[in-house]
Each structure stands twice: as C-alpha cells, then as structure tokens.
Image (tube, rainbow, N blue to C red):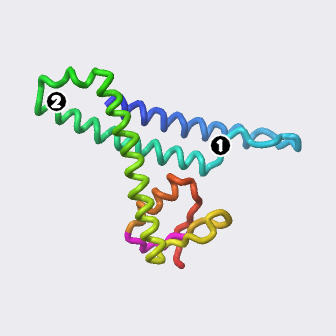
Amino acid sequence: MERTTFALAVLLALTLAANRRRQLLARTPRCFHQVRDEAMKPFTVDMLRAHLMVASLTALAADVLACVTVLVLPEAHHLFVSAAFRLIALAVMASGVIVTRQFAQAAFEHAVEGRHANAAGFHARPVRIAPGCPRLRLVILHLRLTGKPFVLGSH
C-alpha cells in the first residue's frame, strides 16, 4: 500500500508542479534573450504521467497479491520487510511497465495494419486514430508512453 500511495503522491506532485510552472510562465513577459522555457514540454509530462500510471497500477496489483498472501499464509508477513522483497517489488514494477509497453506497441502495430491509425508523419503531424479502433485504449497508451502527439478522428 505504501508504494501505491507514494507513486500516486509523485504523480500528484508532478501534475501540480507542471500546472504551477504553466501559471508562472503565463505571467512572466517573454524576453528576446530567453533561450528556452523552464517548464517541460506537454508531451514529456504526458509521457511521464503515463509511465507513472502504469507503474502505479502494477504496484497496486503487487499489493493485492501481497494482501492475498498474508490472508492465505498468516505467518509469511515477515517476508515483506526484507531487502530481497523490496528488490523483487521494484523488478516487478519495472517489468510491468515493460510488458505493458510491449502490449501497447503490438496494439498500435495491429491498428496501423488494420488502417485504424496512420504511421506516416510521426515527426511532422500527429498520429490520427479512428474512433472505431478495436484496441483504442492500448493504442492511445502506446502513443502516450512514447510521447507522440495524436488526434482522434475519422480517416
């Protein structure tokens, strides 16, 4: 439960910090010698949010598994305070993000093959996704995880 709470707190802090930076930048005058904005780009923030959300959901699943283990084996609660358990939990969260990225990428490739999304213009234009895409949520997750802009619309 602590990891999930911590991950959600980090997600909230990133969101609040990004909103605060946007407000500050909106009030400050633009100077010609200002090289670049101090705030992160919206696609970077969106990409970090997507990764944190996937990691949070993976941590939630690990917490549920730990609670079930304690209910089934009441004497096993001492296993959850060891350093090995913490390393395994970190590995589970990292592998959960990697596996989710792979599933989302496969869904995006399937959507491109089925002409529900276009792969052309990755650098110039946003990716257009058809609203009738069978794996729409996974395709959007892939685009958010990779930081690519997208629009929902018909072809």
- The residue drawn where x is 54% and y is 79% is 155
Residue nearest the observer in this picture, 38 or 23: 38
* Residue at the disc numbered 1: 40
Identify the main secondary structure in magenta: loop
Q: Is residue 138 left or right of residue 28?
A: left
Considering the numbered disc 1 on the image, is that residue within a helix, a strand or a loop? loop
- The residue drawn where x is 39% and y is 52% is 100
- Confirm or deny contact between disc 1 and disc 2 (CB under 8 A): no
* Residue 136 in magenta stretch: no
Q: Which amino acid does label 2 sit on?
A: Val
Q: Is residue 21 above or below residue 125?
A: above
Picture coordinates of residue 15, whole percent (x, y): 54, 40
Considering the numbered disc 2 on the image, is that residue within a helix, a strand or a loop? helix
Picture coordinates of residue 87, whole percent (x, y): 35, 29
Residue 140's label in the rendered image is: none
Residue 76 occupies which quadrant of the picture? top left
* Residue 130 in magenta stretch: yes
Picture coordinates of residue 36, whole percent (x, y): 77, 43
* Residue at the disc numbered 2: 70
Q: Which amino acid does label 1 sit on?
A: Met
- The residue drawn where x is 31% and y is 31% is 1
How packed mark 2 is, by other alpha carbons closer than 10 Å (few <14, some 14-19, many 20 or more), is some
Picture coordinates of residue 132, whole percent (x, y): 42, 74
Q: In this view, does 54 lie above or below 154?
A: above
Q: How far apart are marks 1 and 2 (CA)?
A: 42 Å
Q: In this view, does 137 lie above or below 73?
A: below
Residue nearest the observer in this picture, 57 or 75: 75
* Mark 1 / mark 2, whichever is N-terminal: 1
Q: Is residue 125 above or below residue 97?
A: below
Chain part drawn in magenta: 128-134
